[in-house]
Image (tube, rainbow, N blue to C red):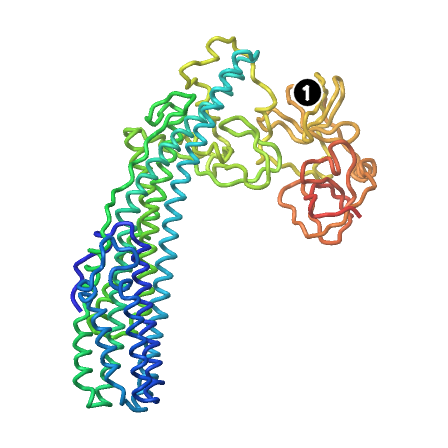
């Protein structure tokens, strides 16, 4: 076999399907030859007549599929008889058929040898190479899907950007008649920030899509095609080795066929995958050029440029994204280097197998090589995405890469309403809807994480809410033409989830009393309606959020604004009060536990399957406590909340 000098990847860009078809043709040839030797073993026992019939049948089959083997299914130039004869593999196969036509007098020993040593080997090579081909095509569709996913993300980010632009315009128009100027200005700034972030994400996704496109056509596809080419070469080498062995068997059994079989062996020796591949390339060269790069497309109803926005708030987003991308790249690079080293090791191993000419010994090495080569492509694609983001952002920031002390956020669940330290909107949910800094305890929405400046105090509880939104980032600031209006509303004053108080009877023996100086109407299940002059018991003090948890004379509990209360002394409760409260606040409605539930927070109730729990009463108790959570009493009188989908009415 000759050393390969023609490369599918370089000379046949983006023709994986045609190369796969060629590989199928080679597998088809292998199957044909295997069937040929199998049938020949049978026909050898029936002597010359049927052997000649088989050779004729095989010749017709070869003539029918000859063009597919030589130039593929859709060549760009017509295949002539001369080109057909130039294919060394096709010529060798023709010699095999000629030898069979003359081997009509072969005996049963030869048939036994052909059955046991040739057909089974061809079947193993065919099965192994068919697996290789399936693996290659699966990987091709995987990287194609990965590329299309990134393309789709770019399209999605463009749609998000267009929608946010439209929302900015809606907020701008609504603010004209809004009586609350500062609130309108804040809503407008928030929406505009979302639009600018969407724009930056859209530009980044465009840059990423262009990088992936270039990598896909310049690296991934050529690498995949070259792997196909190498597999094809090794398939041909294995085929030639097995068929050569078949010829040697015939030479040892039939001296009379020695001259003919020697000619077949010579033809097989002359098989040159490189020459045949060059003929295939020459017959399938098509014009090809890379698709054009994507560019930024302004929204139809919002004029903008293609420059990344580096206003204060969007700049923080970019700085945090830059730091995150660099951290991911640092983790990725060692894995990529290792995979490349392993791929080179397996390639050298395969080259050594080829030099030793030992068919059948390369299965494990080839599988390992293909797996590592695929992994290299996948990891290098991830690295390409990260490098594209890093380079694009770093060029725009020009060295201003944010504060020296970034927050270390982790996913958190919030069992009571909590204010986002960035956007001042409530966080609520048990399904990890927010993030909390492990160093300073700042809690934010997941979507706000990248908007928080890298200014962590590294002291738990010592943090300041971001002031970035308070400075106008718009070219037309609505707040400039409006008078300042106080915004100390309860929407920005929710208690922190980190404050949990023991609700057991022992913890409630001494409570501060407070007098309501302003009436308050509850607007959620977590709040408590109180009237002016009423005396309430303080259960949880103000933790800095501006809210206090209290209980009224009926035992109802909830949150009220801290500024609505004044101190009224303390109250010593009787030891028997818990049991009295249970009897006063129990509803008489029972539920049965369907599953075990272990309390995760103070105030929750541990229940076991089959337990009966009596629901509490009141507008904020029992089934009215909160969406997905009910309140009740266990058999030992302990009060707490539990998931409503863990119980059924008894």
Viewer-proximal residue among 497 and 323: 323
Instruction: Say if residue 20 shows up in the picture.
Output: yes
Quarter in which the N terminus is drawn: bottom left
- Residue 100 image position (x, y, % from top left): 26, 81
Quickly name the residue at label 1. Answer: 565
In the foreground, 178 or 59: 59
Nearer the observer, 454 or 119 = 119
- Check the image and report above or below for 523 versus 485: below
Task: Say few, some or many: other residues with alpha carbon within 10 Å of mark 1 (under 14 / 14 to 19 / 20 or more).
Answer: many
Coordinates of residue 71 in the picture (x, y in percent): 25, 60
Instruction: Relative to 263, say whether 212 is above or below.
Output: above
Quarter of the figure with residue 299? top left
- Quarter occupied by residue 577: top right
Q: Quadrant of residue 547?
A: top right
Residue at the image position 83 percent from the left and 41 percent from the top: 588
All told, the count of numbered labels is 1
Residue 346 in view here:
no
On the image, the x and y values in percent for residue 436 come to 50, 37
Position of residue 135 measured from the top left corner of the image (x, y, whole percent): 37, 60
Residue 155's place in the image compared with 482, above or below, is below
Q: Is residue 503 above or below residue 315?
A: below
Tell whether 343 sits left or right of 328. Answer: left
Query: What element does badge 1 sit on?
Result: strand
Which is more toward the observer, 198 or 609? 198
Asked whether, in this view, residue 522 is left or right of residue 356, the answer is: right
């Amino acid at each position: 076999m000759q050393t390969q000098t023609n490369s599918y990847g370089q000379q046949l860009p983006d023709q994986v399907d045609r190369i796969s078809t060629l590989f199928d043709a080679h597998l088809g040839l292998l199957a044909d030859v295997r069937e040929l030797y199998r049938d020949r073993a049978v026909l050898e026992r029936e002597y010359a007549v049927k052997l000649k019939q088989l050779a004729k049948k095989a010749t017709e089959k070869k003539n029918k599929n000859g063009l597919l083997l030589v130039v593929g299914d859709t060549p760009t130039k017509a295949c002539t008889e001369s080109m057909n004869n130039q294919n060394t593999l096709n010529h060798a196969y023709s010699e095999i058929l000629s030898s069979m036509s003359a081997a009509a007098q072969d005996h049963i020993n030869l048939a036994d040898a052909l059955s046991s040593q040739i057909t089974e080997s061809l079947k193993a090579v065919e099965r192994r190479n068919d697996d290789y081909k399936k693996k290659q095509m699966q990987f091709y569709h995987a990287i194609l899907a990965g590329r299309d996913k990134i393309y789709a993300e770019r399209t999605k980010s463009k749609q998000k950007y267009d929608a946010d632009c439209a929302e900015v315009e809606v907020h701008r128009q609504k603010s004209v008649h809004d009586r609350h100027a500062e609130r309108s200005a804040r809503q407008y700034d928030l929406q505009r920030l979302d639009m600018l972030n969407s724009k930056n994400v859209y530009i980044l996704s465009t840059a990423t899509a262009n990088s992936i496109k270039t990598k896909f056509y310049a690296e991934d596809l050529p690498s995949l095609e070259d792997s196909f080419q190498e597999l094809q070469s090794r398939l041909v080498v294995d085929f030639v080795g097995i068929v050569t062995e078949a010829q040697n068997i015939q030479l040892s059994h039939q001296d009379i066929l020695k001259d003919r079989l020697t000619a077949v062996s010579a033809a097989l020796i002359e098989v040159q995958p490189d020459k045949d591949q060059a003929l295939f390339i020459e017959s399938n060269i098509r014009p090809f050029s890379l698709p054009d790069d994507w560019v930024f497309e302004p929204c139809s109803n919002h004029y903008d440029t293609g420059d990344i926005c580096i206003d204060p708030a969007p700049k923080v987003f970019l700085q945090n994204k830059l730091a995150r991308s660099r951290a991911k790249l640092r983790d990725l690079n060692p894995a990529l280097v290792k995979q490349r080293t392993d791929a080179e090791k397996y390639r050298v191993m395969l080259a050594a197998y080829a030099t030793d000419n030992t068919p059948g010994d390369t299965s494990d090495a080839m599988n390992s090589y293909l797996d590592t080569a695929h992994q290299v492509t996948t990891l290098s694609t991830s690295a390409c995405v990260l490098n594209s983001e890093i380079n694009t952002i770093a060029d725009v920031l020009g060295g201003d890469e944010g504060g020296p002390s970034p927050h270390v956020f982790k996913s958190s669940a919030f069992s009571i309403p909590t204010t986002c330290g960035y956007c001042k909107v409530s966080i609520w949910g048990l399904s990890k809807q927010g993030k909390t800094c492990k160093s300073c305890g700042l809690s934010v929405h997941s979507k706000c994480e990248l908007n928080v400046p890298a200014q962590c105090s590294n002291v738990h509880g010592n943090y300041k809410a971001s002031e970035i939104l308070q400075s106008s980032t718009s070219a037309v600031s609505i707040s400039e033409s409006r008078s300042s209006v106080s915004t100390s509303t309860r929407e920005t004053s929710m208690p922190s989830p980190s404050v949990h108080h023991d609700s057991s009877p022992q913890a409630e023996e001494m409570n501060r009393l407070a007098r309501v100086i302003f009436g308050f109407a509850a607007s959620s299940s977590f709040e408590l309606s109180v009237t002016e002059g009423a005396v309430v018991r303080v259960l949880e003090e103000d933790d800095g959020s501006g809210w206090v948890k209290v209980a009224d004379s009926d035992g109802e509990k909830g949150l009220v604004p801290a500024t609505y209360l004044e101190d009224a002394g303390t109250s010593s409760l009787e030891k028997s009060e818990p049991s009295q409260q249970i009897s006063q606040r129990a509803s008489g409605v029972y539920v049965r536990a369907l599953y075990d539930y272990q309390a995760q927070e103070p105030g929750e109730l541990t229940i076991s399957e089959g337990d009966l729990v009596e629901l509490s009463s009141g507008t904020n108790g029992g089934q009215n406590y909160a969406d997905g959570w009910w309140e009740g009493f266990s058999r030992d009188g302990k009060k707490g909340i539990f998931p409503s989908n863990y119980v059924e009415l008894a």
